[in-house]
Image: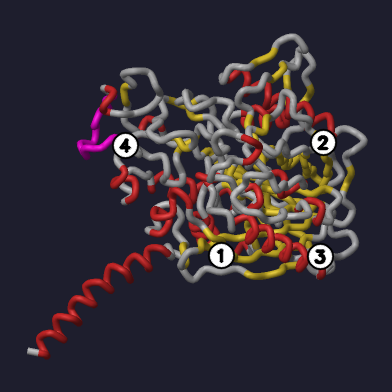
Amino acid sequence: MKKWLKRIAIVLVLLLAIPLLTIAYWMKGPNRSYRVDYLLQSVAAAEDEPLQVGAAMRDVTPPFDEYEPWTDANGDSRYDPKDGDTYEDENGNGRPDLVWLGGFAGNRPATGVHDPLWSRAIALRYGGLTIAIVSIDSVGMTHEQFIAIRKSLDPDLGIDHVMFSTTHTHSGPDTMGIWSNSNDIPGLLLGTHFNDEYMERIRALTREAIHEAVRKLEPAEMICAQAEVEKPGFVRDSRQPDVHDRHITMARFVRQWTDETIATMVSWGNHPEVLNDDNTLITADFPFYWRDGVEYGVVNPNGAEGIGGMCMFLQGACGGLMTPLNIEVPHRDGEQAFSEADYAKSQALGENLALLTLETLRGDAAWKEENPSIRVAAKTIFAPLGGVFKYAIMLGAVHPGYFWGKARTEVNVIRIGDLEILAVPGEIYPEIVDGGVEQPEGADFSVAPIETPGLRTLMQGKVNMVVGLANDEIGYIVPKSQWDVEAPFAYEREKAQYGEENSGGPETAPVVYRELVELMERLHANE
């Protein structure tokens, strides 16, 4: 009898252990052993060796004609059968195969395309070191997607490092699995509505863009500049304290001995959400008009000639929340102004940014880099992640790469001559970047500001570019001393401010800040 009891106990233990081990396996994702921890530096180049640069881009707009049409019965831009919304089940699989848009609330399917989405790549080589910088028109992509692209690159091209970022457009396909038909929560968590085929398409086309950019490497010169952005007409901070990303940082790469542009990088922190949650057309939002204006110019009145080449937008410090919603954007004619969440406002904002970029790059503040050596520091880190998506993360449905309470992510520092780029894996609050973290009365933790001094003040470039949503999207990176979800609320508010519900938790910012500072110190110590 005792033997039977032991056998039953063993069977029960196995029955319990198998699902637990399976979940633990899922939690760590498909690239569970992936780690990076390196400092790369270009070797001393010959005195006359130029920087080499190449650029390429691929259209990553979903093939809209391959998806099923739907009918919005009550005009609320949401798919919900309870409202009488219907779809045409053309493939007979019993579920709506729609282009689910990411950002804002869930259940928002696209009805068409306003402007294309792109994956853009700039490759750089100097002193035997080759890197690429990539920007994708997407609401955000998690780390394992970028790992997969890195692993798929042609080893014969000798690419040493790739830094990825997403623009955070709120009018592109759901690329994280959060917004795809959340009417059906079990289906969402099991991935039955998330479009894995579209993710494969993005990865393949991004790989193509990187390969082409490297194959097109040619002698080039780098021109850098920085412009100051004041808030009126550009951005609004919807959360106290009132701090915004004041810096548009830019780098223009031209063919050696010419003024012919190969590519331009621009970076600034603001949510691409001029087209609010009523919009159902796919669009890159204001970055579309910004890039287009830099490349092709802005027409009169008060326009400017473009500089050609390919323009890349890299998202900056947009947490906090930096938004163009509920502001008035002036038209360049000095007479009109736009406050409605429509394409006229999106165009005005993008073209104003393009004009400021063109003026700055052509002005006295622009300078040419004389010593374009390249250095890269990259490190895998583990950051606490929880919040509203905690259990979806644990199951590997939202952010594969979950290791016993912490998510695997990555931080980078890249130096190209006197241009320094800090790659942050989420939506960092501008006060962590430029200073201004507070300890407001009523916040949940009675701690002095931890994430100080501002990261940009610790950078050592002549132009310091802070790129958000880089190599990952772990949500809002909220200063711990400003964490505020329990009453009484900070700033004498009646309810909590928006932000924490889309954050990994109060310990995320201190960990990310510390790792970024240590990585910068490591890079700077090896100069």
* Residue holding disc 3: 524
Marks 4/2: CA–CA distance = 44 Å
- Of pointers 2 and 3, the one earlier in the residue sequence: 2
Q: Is residue 119 visible?
A: no
Q: Pointer 1: what residue?
A: 382
Verify CB contact (< 8 Å) between mark 4 and mark 2. Answer: no
The amino acid type, in three-letter code, at marker 2 is Ala
Q: Is residue 410 within the magenta segment? A: no
Quadrant occupied by the N terminus? bottom left
Which of discs 4 and 2 lies nearer the camera? The answer is 4
User: Tag 3: residue type?
Assistant: His
SS type, badge 1: strand
Per the model, the C-alpha gap separating discs 4 and 1 is 32 Å
N-terminal-most mark, 4 or 2: 4
The reply to whether residue 460 is visible in this rendering is: yes
Mark 4 — residue? 183
Q: Which residue is mark 2?
A: 227
Where residue 154 sits: x, y (%)? 55, 61
Image position, residue 323 (x, y; %): 63, 32
**Element under disc 4:** loop
Mark 2 packing: few (<14 Cα in 10 Å), some, or many (20+)? some
State the SS at label 3: helix
48 is higher (above) or lower (below) than 109: below
Q: In the image, residue 172 lies at what x, y percent? A: 49, 35
* Type of amino acid at the residue the image marks with label 1: Phe
